[in-house]
Image (tube, rainbow, N blue to C red):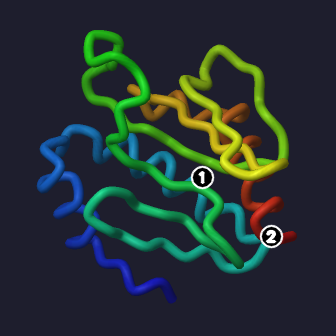
Amino acid sequence: MDGRTQGDILQFFDLNGHPGALPLYAAVERAALALDEFGPVRVKVSKTQISFYNRRLFACVSFARVKRAKDLPDPWLTVTFGLDHRVENPRIAVATEPYPRRWTHHLVIGSPDEVDAELTGWLRAAAGFAAGK
């Protein structure tokens, strides 16, 4: 399995001072764990992010500030995923190309409802991209 525990996840939100964002994470986790068509999805909890892996890292959640503080909802969570192309969409707060044809996208969610078909599609594409590397 992935070695994570519910306690690790709760501690992540408590230590980062955002316990109210736990329902946001739960929605992202459900979407990510459902992407098992590319192999089993593992979850790794660290101090600064919770990462989702299949063969490789394909997405993570964190409290990285990719928007100005006044533009962040309450609660909020940053969702990050990687693709081989840049996604042009107003939901994407920041997109960078750290390596040729490797784009990292960051978006902020403020409601579990924002983990919709569009975001799930990006996560699916990211999982497929990571599995194919």
Judging from the image, what secondary structure is the residue with disc 1 in?
Answer: helix
* Sooner in the amino-acid sequence: mark 1 or mark 2: 1
Question: Could you say where residue 76 lies in the image, as x and y percent from the top left?
Answer: 33, 31
User: Which residue shows up at 43% across the image and 73% down it?
Assistant: 44
Residue marked by disc 2: 37
User: Which residue shows up at 65% across the image and 14% down it?
Assistant: 90
60 sits left or right of 89 in the view: left
64 sits left or right of 53 in the view: left
Q: Residue furthest top?
A: 70
Question: Could you say where residue 110 lies in the image, as x and y percent from the top left?
Answer: 39, 26
Classify mark 1: residues with Cα within 10 Å, few (<14), some (14-19) or many (20+): some
Where residue 69 sits, quadrant-wise, is: top left
Classify mark 2: residues with Cα within 10 Å, few (<14), some (14-19) or many (20+): few
Question: Could you say where residue 4 lies in the image, as x and y percent from the top left?
Answer: 36, 79
Question: Could you say where residue 109 lies in the image, as x and y percent from the top left?
Answer: 45, 29
Quadrant where the image shows the C terminus: bottom right
Residue type highlighted by circle 1 = Ala
Q: Residue furthest front?
A: 99
Judging from the image, what secondary structure is the residue with disc 2 in?
Answer: helix
Residue marked by disc 1: 31
Residue 38, placed above or below residue 113: below
